[in-house]
Structure formats: structure tokens, C-alpha cells
Image (tube, rainbow, N blue to C red):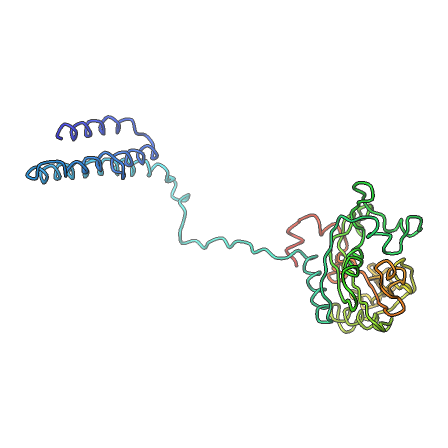
Amino acid sequence: MLDKLERIKGNLQEETKAINTLKGAEQLRTKYLGRKGSINDLMKLIPTLPVEKRAAYGQQINSLKIEITDIIEGLIKKFSSKTIPKNKTEIFDITLPGKRPSIGKSHPLTQTIDDIKEVFARLGFDVAYGPEVESEYYNFEALNIPPDHPSRTDFDTFYIKGDILLRSQTSTVQIRIMEKQEPPIRIIAPGRVYRPDTVDARHSFMFHQVEGLLVDEGVSFADLKGVLNQFIKTYFGQDIKMRFRPSFFPFTEPSAEVDISCSLCRSKGCNVCSYSGWVEILGAGMVDPNVFKAVHYDAEKYTGFAFGMGVERITMLKHGIGDIRLFYENDMRFLSQF
């Protein structure tokens, strides 16, 4: 037993000479003082000794353990001090206030969509979603836009393969909902849409839309005007005025472009409203009977209205933003303002 003690002490002295890093000192402590270390192995031998020799042998092990501990702690202290900068100004001051982590928040476009959903939720509209990859049938034909229709160019999009494409409008969701559900229907459909537009301050090949649909018995154009008037005044302010201009959309008849009084110049005229005092905000109209025919609704029994608005345009008008590209550049100087 004494030979083992002396052998451990001799090995420690030799290994200590080779230690020159803090990591090496930690490894040496594990080897001799760890749960599976040399000292613990010696302690396990005590029960095998004669009773009269156990106390003396235990004292020798404890003395060796104290000696090894002092040597190793001296090495750890020595090499730990080397990691502390000699220049006191470089030492971390624990009294300094910490750096507050930045808190994330929703993108301005997401905020606008949430605000729009909240307004229409008060009016009893549900939110519906659909796939961004669609077929020509849902994107065009079911919406009364046959292959030879001249308006199809305005809604052209990116084709993937055959008749599979990226949707150019969220009206596709309206068709899918009407196929599965009988009236009454009251939904809005937010989501991304795609069109091969040249990117500039007002256009992007990808943007966001929110379209709405209401179908029931006895729905009139007056109902459409009432719903849109309530949305516009809630979102933009009670002093905002609204007007309808005749227009054309293949899936609604009659159709209209909806303008609001410019919220930036208060109808006095500015570059945003082209000095007219009015800004186009969305398109709307009564659902065309041919759309009802595609989803097997009785056009003699049911009527409805639909509308669609660009989320980017709504956000730009709300906050006076002049370039749509700012939404997609991930510039925190811009995004942190919202």
C-alpha cells in the first residue's frame, strides 16, 4: 500500500512539470481527484485491509489528497491569472448596465393584415386561406376569365408546369370556399400573390392582397358600399370620404374602383394623389352570375359582392411611404419605425 502511495506521488511530480495550460491542470485534477481518479481508487482498498491498519492507511491517503489538491489548485490559479488582461481597463466591469436585447415585432405588412382582419371580424367576416400554387381553372376560368378573354393579360402570372401557376389573386380562395360551402358566406382571404410586373416604386412581382366575399339572399350594391364605408372610416379615420368609379372586372358586374380622399393632404392635393385629392384604394363589385355558375350556386336565388385591396398600397397610404421596395429590403432603420 505504501508503495502505491509513493508511486502516485512520484507520478504527480513528473506530470506537474509538463503542465503549462489551464486545461492541462483541470485534466490533472480529474485524473487524481475525480470520481474515478487515483485517490478514490486507494480509498476503495481500505475495507480490504486488517482492521488495525485501516486508520493509519486512511490518514496517509488523506494527507496525500491534501498535498495533491494544493499542487493542482496552485497550477489552476497560476494559469487562470494568465487569462486576465494585465491592462485593468480591459477587465469586465460587473457594475456596468447590461445590453438590452432587441425585441422583435411584426412586419408592417403583417400589422396591416392583422388590422384589416380585426376590422372585418367586427363585421362578421371569417378569415380563409388557400394555396399559393394554383391551377388555371381556379385562377382564371372559374373566375369568368376564359383563355381568350382580353383581361387575362392583366392577371397573368408565373407558370410552373402545364396549367400549374402561382396565383395572381386571392380570389381563388373564394372559389374554393364556395365549392365546399353553401351560402351564406362572409369571408376575407389574405395572402401573397404573384404577377410578372417590373419592379419599381409602385410595383413588385410579389405582393399581398386581402379579398372579401359576401354571398346570401338579397345582397345588394348598397350592402357593399356600407361594408366598405365602415372599413375605410375605421381604418383611415372618420373624416375620410369614399367614392365609386365605374370599372370592369371579369368576375364582378357591375364593377367599381373605390377611391378615398387623400389622408396625407386632406384632399388639398399632393404628389401622392397626383393633386386630385383622391387615391384609388381597391376594386369591388357584385359577383358575376357566371362565377356562381362555376360553383353551382343558383344565381336567381343568391347575390353577393366581392372586393380586393393591395396590402402594400394600404400600408403606403396609411403611413405615407413612397416606395414599395422598402418593405422587402429588411432594412431595420425602416422597419423599426412601425
Q: Position of residue 245 (x, y in %)?
A: 90, 65
Q: Position of residue 73 (x, y in %)?
A: 26, 38
Q: Identify the residue shown where x is 41% and y is 44%.
A: 89
Residue 316, quarter of the rendered image: bottom right
Determine whether, in the image, residue 108 is placed left or right of residue 153. left
| Quarter of the image where one finds residue 64 | top left
Q: Where 29 sits versus 209, above or below?
A: above
Image quadrant in which the N terminus is located:
top left
**Percent position (x, y) of residue 273?**
84, 61
Residue at (81%, 73%) from the top-left corner? 226
The front one of 302 and 336 is: 302
- Counting labels gives 0
Identity of the residue drawn at 72% across and 57% down:
129
Give whichever of 52, 257 is nearer the camera: 52
In the rendered view, tell whether residue 266 sits above or below residue 25. below
Q: In this view, does 234 lie to the left or right of 280?
A: left
User: Which quadrant of the rendered structure holds the C terminus?
Assistant: bottom right
| Between 286 and 295, the one nearer to me in the picture | 295
When asked about the image quadrant of residue 105, the answer is bottom right
Q: Give the x, y percent position of residue 240.
A: 80, 71
Tell me what residue is drawn at x 76 percent, y 48 percent. Answer: 133
